[in-house]
Amino acid sequence: MKNRRIIEVLVIVIIFFSACADSKKFKIDGKEVEVEPYGWFDLESKNDSINYKVNVGNVVLDIIFCETIVVPIVLTGSQLYEPVSKK
């Protein structure tokens, strides 16, 4: 029982520190715009004038913690794609 509790705490800590995707600032139409990462929870927040790439760090964590079910849903749902450059 104690080992299970330790694993649960470690998973929660890893979830909080695993957000590898960062928001980035780009100049679009003369304005400084901060573009956030997006996932399948918020597909409408994708900016069409920005190139995105899959966040490999979050995908690796999803594979490692696939048995928890929660970690893959949270990470791919909110931060699957990260902004890279302006189109």
Image (cartoon, helix red, strand yellow):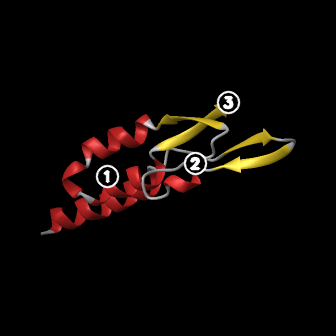
Front one among 16 and 26: 26
Amino acid marked by disc 1: Pro
- Across and down, in percent, residue 12 comes to 35, 62
Residue that badge 1 annotates: 72
User: Residue tagged by mark 2?
Assistant: 46
Decide: is 34 above or below 29: below
Residue that badge 3 annotates: 87
Where, by quadrant of the figure, is residue 4 drawn?
bottom left
User: Label 3: how many residues lie within 10 Å, few (<14), some (14-19) or many (20+)?
Assistant: few
Q: Estimate the spatial distance between the alpha carbons at disc 1 and disc 2, rounded to whole Å.
A: 20 Å
Quadrant of the rendering where the N terminus is positioned: bottom left
- Give the image location of residue 19, x and y in percent: 48, 50
Asked if the residue at tag 2 contacts the one at tag 1, i.e. Cβ–Cβ closer than 8 Å, the answer is no
Density class for disc 2 (Cα within 10 Å; few <14, some 14-19, many ≥20) is some
Q: Residue at x 18, y 53 (%)?
A: 67
28 or 80, which lies in front? 28
* 58 displayed left or right of 69: right
Earlier residue among tags 3 and 1: 1
